[in-house]
Image (tube, rainbow, N blue to C red):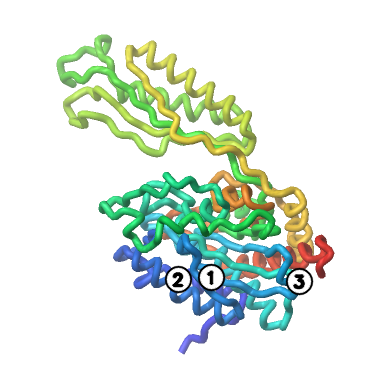
Amino acid sequence: MVSAPAPGGARAVARCQALGVAPYSDMAGGLYRGYLTPAYRAAQDTLSGWMAEAGMQVSLDPAANLVGRYEGTDPAAPLLLIGSHLDSVRDGGCYDGPLGVMLGIEAVDALHRAGRRLPFAIEVIAFGDEEGSRFPAAMLTSRAVAGTLPAEALDLVDGEGVALARAGVDVARFRTAARAPGSVMAYLEAHIEQGPLLESEGLAVGTVTGIAAQLRFRVHLAGMAGHAGTTTMPLRRDALAGAAEMIVAIERIAQADASDVVATVGRIAAAPGAANVIAGSVDFTLDVRSGDGARRDRVAHAILSAMEATAGRRGLALSIEQVHDLPASPCDPALVALVDAAMVKAGQPVRRLVSGAGHDAMVMAALCPTAMVFIRCRGGISHNPAEHVEPADAEVALAVMLGFIDQLGASRGLA
């Protein structure tokens, strides 16, 4: 008989793995846990038991976020909120989101086993919908908690025609999950890096200084469909060839900036899509990100200008729709310094980095100061079943989180 891992980072990793299969997944042969699905409810049930074992009082808020509360000695003190998300992308990995929740539970469990109560309460929250993999909107539940979710954002229907209002939440109360201003002193999130930098530098953890600004566009190119065998090359208005030239230019311009800017075409579709027909139209996406909003905008402008020049030269009609514009979300400088100090205390070199991916922390910044800890993941792979985290790295992250909690108390004169 194999014994269960002892409390700590290894147990956090093992619990993430346990939630990666049925009944915690709605997908046969892989992991998919959408917001409010049966797998989501099953995961919440198990997670609530782990929270209770760690000494927390467990509840669901009106947005169906699972919350575990570990009381402090001063009921009037603003609390520390530790969290990440419980949902997953389709055919995703076990650690993206849940690892941050599990490490939050482990941090509270360590305090509970030591008989420690801080002057402020600690709450661990498992957000329900960071990925937006079921309903066509992301971070619904953290936006509800932060108080930034408009009422019209709840008018949603999933891919199977199920409205959010009929999925198991009371949309009339959903936005009452908002925390009162001043009630939360800080938000801490641990998350896998979802990139290769930490691994490339041989580091287990890193301090996140902020989340990159993001621009996303939908691009439509219209040319002229024609017979592949009879339309001579000089007479063609090939939308797919034009898109190919644009995509190469997108990569070239982003690389030439020699900065943290990244530009991605993640989806492309050509019509009519026949082997013997010149593509008459193409649709593709464009995503541009940087830790510096002005740098992002400068590179995006250069890319769009190059696309317009290509379309004009090739006789193609180009339309570009901006889908969203997410500003950079810096972590709180004082909390970043506390994370750095906790790194040193845990025997780790300080490595600061910007997150290119979005996280619930960027939403929570509207409510309170935020901090993030990144954890090395093998190959930088995420949103993939091959996602992997070493238990030893999770143990280091837990030590940093506990050090951060101590530093936070000391910095506020509370411990």
Q: Is residue 225 left or right of residue 141?
A: left
Residue at label 1?
A: 13
Residue at label 3?
A: 119
* Secondary structure at numbered mark 3: loop
Residue at label 2?
A: 44
Asked if labels 2 and 1 touch by Cβ distance under 8 angstroms, the answer is no
Q: Nearer the viewer, residue 58 or 397?
A: 58
Q: Position of residue 7 (x, y in %)?
A: 60, 79
Q: Position of residue 371 (x, y in %)?
A: 67, 54
Seen at 56% across and 44% down, the residue is 356
Looking at the image, the residue that sits furthest to the right is: 413
Seen at 33% across and 64% down, the residue is 26
Q: Residues within 10 Å of mark 1 (few under 14, many from 20)?
A: many
Splitting the image into 4 quarters, where does residue 391 fall? bottom right
Q: Mark 1 vs mark 2: give the one in front.
A: 2
Q: Is residue 342 visible?
A: yes
In three-dimensional space, the C-alpha distance between marks 3 and 1, rounded to whole angstroms, equals 29 Å
* Secondary structure at numbered mark 1: helix
The C terminus sits in image quarter? bottom right
Q: Residues within 10 Å of mark 3 (few under 14, many from 20)?
A: some
Mark 1 / mark 2, whichever is N-terminal: 1
Residue type at tag 3 = Pro
In three-dimensional space, the C-alpha distance between marks 1 and 2, rounded to whole angstroms, equals 17 Å
Residue type at tag 1 = Val
Asked if labels 3 and 2 touch by Cβ distance under 8 angstroms, the answer is no
Seen at 41% across and 28% down, the residue is 321
